[in-house]
Image (tube, helix red, strand yellow):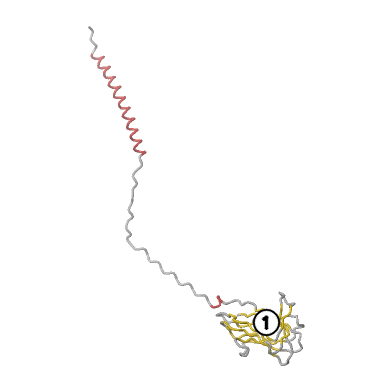
Amino acid sequence: MDQRSPTVYRTKSWRSRRRVVTVAGAAALLLAGYLLGRWQDTPAEPVISTPAAATAAPPAQAPPSAAPSASPEATAIRYAVLQAESATELSGVETEKTDDEGGGENVGWVNRDDYLRFDNFDFGAVAATKAEIRMSSGARITGRVQIRLDSRDAAPVGELSVSNTGSWQSWQTGTAVLQPVTGTHTVFLTFTSDEDDEFVNINWLRFEH
């Protein structure tokens, strides 16, 4: 019986082992690649950092500065127009339709010792220093319109002379200078003349600072 040559046997055996080693190596590489991919896909554990303790207290904030108080002029009241026919009390006079701007009524047939009274008028903290009076006259005589506070017999705080304006419906605005007035008062509009006759119509009164 012929025996195989040792050289041929070793050659075949070596080739077989080489194939086994190659296959095993390839399998090992595939496994390693798979494991490496799984490792890379695994999310890393979150790292929780502890904030360092403050080494110094934050600087103290300066308290807000107080807002400047408003000046009296900034809070001055803008006075409403006092319509003569709307006075709290009308004494010795009558009302009539007016031809003045804005329409409405005026007070007429005004003689000396007649008066209008306006209750609880608030002048505010900033003094009123003048008054505008809307008036007309067709009289042949002159007279004065006077402003008094709290009593019809009090001394006038301002007054205005009246003379003929052209007719009883020819309106003009006169300005009376006032002693400075603040606070809340009853306002009287009084009338005086040297003659006992009607001498003026009044449409409205408005105070100004």
Residue shown at the point (64%, 81%) measured from the top left: 88
Whether residue 80 is situated above or below residue 19 in the rendered picture:
below
Looking at the rendered image, the quarter that the C terminus falls into is: bottom right
Q: From the image, tell me which residue sits under label 1.
A: 133
Along the viewing direction, whichever of 38 and 21 lies nearer the viewer: 38
Residue shown at the point (64%, 84%) measured from the top left: 117
Residue 97 occupies which quadrant of the picture? Answer: bottom right
**Residue 150 percent across, percent down from the top left:** 59, 86
**Residue 22 percent across, percent down from the top left:** 31, 24
The residue lying furthest to the bottom in this view is 194
**Residue 152 percent across, percent down from the top left:** 63, 88
Along the viewing direction, whichever of 152 and 36 lies nearer the viewer: 152
Residue shown at the point (28%, 19%) measured from the top left: 16
Residue 21 occupies which quadrant of the picture? Answer: top left
Residue shown at the point (34%, 33%) measured from the top left: 34
How busy is the neighbourhood of tag 1: few (under 14 within 10 Å), some, or many (20 plus)?
many
**Residue 134 percent across, percent down from the top left:** 69, 81
Along the viewing direction, whichever of 195 and 22 lies nearer the viewer: 195
Looking at the rendered image, the quarter that the N terminus falls into is: top left
Element type at mark 1: strand
